[in-house]
Amino acid sequence: MLHSFPVRLVLLTITCCLFAASGTVQASQSEGFKGAQAAFNKQQYDQALQLIEALGEKGSIAPDVRRLKIRTLTKLGKPLDALAEYDVFIPSGKTDDRPLLREVAFGCITPLIKDMRDQMRGAAFTALKEVESEETVPYFEDGLSD
């Protein structure tokens, strides 16, 4: 009975240390996310992606961080990478995050508007028409001069 007291004390101490370390990691991730979000808002997408990648090295990526990573990849002109990340974020068969998926789709369509092939440009404008957003108007205005 006398020996069990030190063992319990050691286990309790270890448990407290683990919870404290977990809280420190979460606080660190929260601050890292805020920095990445601030860089994204300033349109410093390379810096935002670096900060997000650093968060991923510290453990599992929170949904908000993954969502920001997808948006950042899209803004960097890497829609296929964003789509791959989206597939990890929302596995097949789960309910889609429509606004996020719309942003990724928009990022996939818009580069094709400048494609050298007429068929690709036509397909891009047809797909862009389906987006139905104020955001598409400048692309259509530019396309009229083509």
Image (cartoon, grey):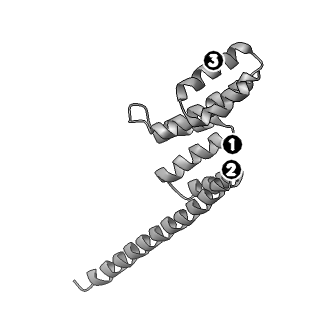
Q: Amino acid at mark 1?
A: Leu
- Name the residue beneath numbered marker 1: 76
Q: Between residue 104 and residue 142, name the one nearer to us.
A: 142
Q: Are marks 2 and 3 in contact (CB under 8 Å)?
A: no
**Vertical side of 27 occupied by 52: above or below:** above
- Name the residue beneath numbered marker 3: 123
**Vertical side of 28 occupied by 41: above or below:** above
Question: For the residues carrying marks 2 and 3, which lies nearer the camera in this image?
Answer: 3
Which structural element holds mark 2? helix
Nearer-N-terminus badge (2/3): 2
**Vertical side of 66 occupied by 98: above or below:** above
**Vertical side of 19 occupied by 146: above or below:** above
Distance from disc 2 to disc 1, alpha carbons, whole Å, reads 6 Å
**Disc 1 packing (10 Å; few <14; some 14–19; many ≥20):** some
- Name the residue beneath numbered marker 2: 45
Q: Where does the image place residue 86, in percent across and percent down from the top left?
A: 52, 38
Q: Amino acid at mark 3?
A: Ala
Residue 61 is at least partly visible in this image: no
Which structural element holds mark 3? helix
Q: Residue at x 47, y 50 (%)?
A: 63
Going by the picture, which residue comes out furthest to the bottom?
2
Q: Between residue 128 and residue 46, name the one nearer to us.
A: 128
Rendered image quadrant of residue 20:
bottom left
Q: Amino acid at mark 2?
A: Tyr
